[in-house]
Amino acid sequence: MSSDKKILENLRNELHKHTHLYYVKDAPVISDYEFDLMLKKLIELESKFPQFFDSNSPSQRVGGKVSKKFNNIKHDYPMYSLDNSYSKQDLDSFNTRILKKIPNNDLTYLCELKFDGVSINLTYENGYLVTAVTRGDGVYGDDVTENVKTIKTVPLKLKGNYPQKFQIRGEIFIELNDFNQMNIERAENGLEPYMNPRNTASGSLKLQDSSEVSKRPLKCFLYQVVSENDDSKTQYDNLLSASSWGFNVSDSYKLCSSIDEVFDFINRWDKKRNNLDFEIDGIVIKVNQIDYQKTLGFTSKYPRWSIAYKFKTLQASTSLLSISYQVGRTGAITPVANLSPVLLGGTIVKRASLHNEDQINKLDLHFNDHVLIEKGGEIIPKIVDVQIDKRNLFSNRISFISKCPSCQSDLSKNELEAHHYCVNFNFCPPQITGRIQHFISRKAMDINGIGNETVQLMFENNLITNYADLYTLKKNDLLNLDRMAEKSVDNIFKGLNDSKKIPFERVLFALGIRYVGQTVSKNLAKKFQSIDNLISQSYDELLMVDEIGERISQSVVDFFKNDNNILNIEKLKKNGLQFESNIKSNVSDVLNNKTFVVSGIFENYSRDQLKNVIELNGGKNLSSVSLKTNYLIAGDKMGPSKLKKAQDLGINIISEQDFNKLLNLNLDVF
Ligand code: AMP
Ligand code: ZN
């Protein structure tokens, strides 16, 4: 082996090892920074030595391949469903059926959690992941290998003493915290929240661009090795082996020697399941001994040696007392249902979110209605149904408010949007305090020393009316506030001072422009480099930026049209905040003044990556072919009409390889 290849392989093995320690074992031994450096080094070497390409290299975790369609593949072993049970009685009959066939008194059951996600079948050969296929109809499933490779808890290379070829099954899911965080970011960008973690996991797995999948917080638990080459004698050993080969196996399983013990396990988890980081919808009970499993066999649908005990969804019925309307920092009005307090899954519930007017209309909600509430992955429970038969004949339908509950200004609602907004941007109190609270928050300016209550207090005492005022606060004014000690005041000034180092992209996010969340802020900062440049852009120019649509462009233009906002920015500038980007904008200018249209599917880039490379090297992307186009980069399966138009106009049609030559590409830019 050449020494270059050896260095590459050592680096890959190290990275595989640290991914396992970090994501599966939860016990990292190096810092994130060291890990990133190693990965960067690997990517550098791989671009230098393309002849040593490895489709299972840790560098492949970031994705990049785009699949137009997922190949339908026949499973080697069908993926059965599980028979369901709902009571101790059901389980007793399951046990009786089994004992009839296997009267041996060494029979044991292995109980596992029933993870509520999407099932996946993984095939490994010589220790490498070769395919990942969804359950589909149980006989045929979709090949989602490229997408699954981006999930860090799925090993790309195994360790220990694994069979040469085998398959393993598991469940891909999203943890509740991650799910809630995703929804917070969606709300920031004015998008509707995702419904529940399971559908979101399943949707993520079917995204066409694997680099998008790599951004989703997917995780995977493995629960069953399926192979003729594995010599485990029991399901218990099967899980131990899987774990020793580097798979992420939940340690919540338990070996039980009677159906009563099984039932104890179920009862324990029925109480504890609300404290888990992820959702489960029941318990899976499996005959432990593989020999006995073989004797029992399968029906046409289920294994006879296993059954799922399903938990009831957490629901409760209560009555609607009233609706409150909250005003967010962008002026968005969110209705919240106040309920008669009721116990649900161990906590007392008094409120449920209603999201927007459509939601109220869909439920046809009336005052004093009896409602059914349910607790899913969200922090706040939701109303899922109204018990119409219990409705009072004379109760009125709830109609949405037309004035802001705080400042009594008119509300506006655009056809395309789900929310109503208070139009009084400059003077509506909750908008003002909301904006300042957003400004100081951790992901924005991260101002230690000031909390949300302090903002409220400062505002009520007329010390601040916008975030720029924070930087001209006087020590004495603060000391005069209730319960404000000298030390706290010093902390506030220190926090404000430290925030002057926060980079432009976060300052931009902190300004609180509607629909401009963290990602959009980053894109805008990178593209326009400074606030002055951004302010001078027109609606149409903003539209040209990747991932910036009409809603965002309009919102940015409107924000800078407001004189108060401009005054605030001037004041912040004077106080030393960063309004110029230090994200390197371009890596070269070899494509300066060149325009490109990108179409079709490419081997080494996703379309977005390709567009990104063009921009990073000074080129410009156009969305359609016209006389202004210099090059059409034609990928696989590009639209025939685009191709014909380019030919008719005599535009240079080039391949991905031609483009690389044009650029003399140095993969370092990734
Ligand atoms: P069902 O979809 O209700 O027929 O239940 C069968 C599904 O449960 C399987 O396809 C798996 O996706 C899922 N499942 C979750 N956890 C487990 C587990 N520990 N063992 C077996 N199946 C599980
Ligand atoms: Zn208002």
Image (cartoon, grey):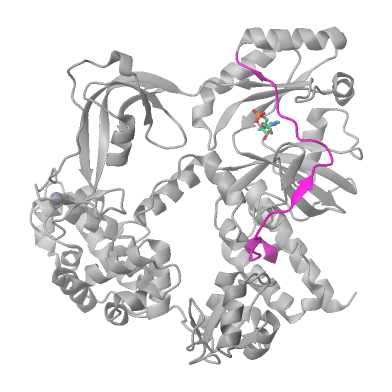
Q: Which residues are magenta?
A: 59-86
When the figure is inspected, residue 473 is found, relative to residue 431, above or below; the finding is: below
In terms of image quadrants, where is residue 33?
bottom right
On the rendered structure, is 293 left or right of 418?
right
Residue at coordinates 9% horizontally, 61% vertically from top-left? 476
- Would you say the magenta stretch is mainly helix, strand or loop? loop
The answer to whether 46 is drawn above or below residue 181 in the figure is below
Spot occupied by residue 263 in the image (x, y as percentages of width and height): 64, 14
Judge whether residue 78 is colored magenta: yes
| Ligand 1, image quadrant it occupies | top right
Q: Nearer the viewer, residue 390 or 245?
A: 390
628 or 221: nearer the eye? 628
| Whether residue 523 is visible | yes
Picture quarter containing residue 267? top right
Q: Residue 287 vs residue 604: left or right?
A: right
Specify whether 593 is left or right of 525.
right
Q: How many marks?
A: 0
Q: Residue at x 90, y 23 (%)?
A: 291
Q: State left or right for residue 394 relative to residue 388.
A: left
Image location (x, y in percent) of residue 54: 78, 67
Task: List x then y, in percent, for residue 112.
Answer: 68, 27
Determine which quarter of the picture holds residue 395: top left
Q: Is residue 298 magenta?
A: no
The answer to whether any part of residue 599 appears in the image is: no
Residue 309 appears at what percent x and percent y? Answer: 63, 20
Above-or-below relation of 320 to 192:
above
Of the 4 image quadrants, the one containing the N terminus is: bottom right
- Residue at x 26%, y 65% (from the top left corner): 496
Where does the C terminus fall, quadrant-wise?
A: bottom right
**Residue at image coords 30%, 74%:** 539
